[in-house]
């Protein structure tokens, strides 16, 4: 597992867009399975999207068609393009990764459990969407 650094959050209105970034220091970023999670106020962490080392992706139903996960293996950076934001997207957003060759679905399910059990989340980046 890695300890990335998230950025790009902010306060926006319904329908606006944000792009989150997650930089992972070190080598072999391209071999990581990566995922984005969020923690809504008063709730537990939930998976948002994941991408495997080959670029395959998966999304939770509530963000399909609005969010896009992508990666830049030269810049060691994971992105989450969020369009048409809604108030229910409000929360602290975190990224997670591992060198185990998960499918996107496996990564989304497994990484969050490990990070939660080991309290290994990074500082996250806050997204607030107002109506």
Image (spheres, rainbow, N blue to C red):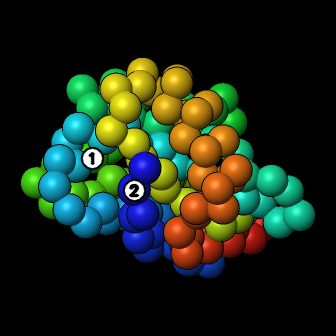
Q: Which residue occupies the extreme right position in the image?
A: 42
Q: Would you name the residue on which mark 2 appears?
A: 2
Vertical position of residue 27 compared to residue 3: above or below: above
Residue 11 image position (x, y, % from top left): 62, 78
Residue occupying image coordinates x 37% and y 31%: 100
Residue occupying image coordinates x 58% and y 33%: 110
Residue 85 image position (x, y, % from top left): 62, 56
Q: Which numbered disc flags the more N-terminal residue, 2 or 1?
A: 2
User: Is residue 55 toward the left or the right of residue 41 in the image?
Assistant: left
Residue 24 image position (x, y, % from top left): 30, 62
Q: Would you name the residue on which mark 1 appears?
A: 71
Please rate how many residues cluster around mark 2, counting C-alpha atoms within 10 Å: few if below 14, some from 14 to 19, many from 20. some
Mark 2–mark 1 distance (CA, rounded to whole Å) = 15 Å
Q: Which is closer to the viewer, label 2 or label 1?
A: 2
- Tag 1's secondary structure? strand
- Nearer to the camera, 83 or 95: 95
Q: Which residue occupies the extreme left position in the image?
A: 74
- Tag 2's secondary structure? loop
Vertical position of residue 65 compared to residue 89: above or below: above
Residue occupying image coordinates x 66% and y 61%: 119
Please rate how many residues cluster around mark 1, counting C-alpha atoms within 10 Å: few if below 14, some from 14 to 19, many from 20. many
């Amino acid at each position: 597992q890695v300890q990335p650094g998230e950025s790009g959050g902010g306060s926006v209105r319904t329908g606006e867009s944000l792009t989150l970034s997650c930089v992972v220091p070190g080598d072999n970023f391209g071999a990581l399975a990566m995922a984005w999670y969020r923690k809504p106020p008063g709730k537990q962490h939930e998976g948002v999207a994941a991408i495997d080392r080959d670029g395959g992706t998966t999304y939770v139903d509530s963000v399909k068609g609005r969010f896009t996960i992508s990666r830049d293996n030269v810049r060691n950076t994971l992105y989450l393009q969020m369009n048409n934001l809604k108030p229910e997207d409000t929360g602290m957003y975190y990224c997670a990764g591992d060198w185990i060759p998960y499918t996107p679905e496996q990564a989304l399910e497994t990484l969050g459990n490990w990070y939660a059990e080991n309290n290994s989340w990074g500082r996250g980046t806050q997204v607030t969407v107002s109506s």
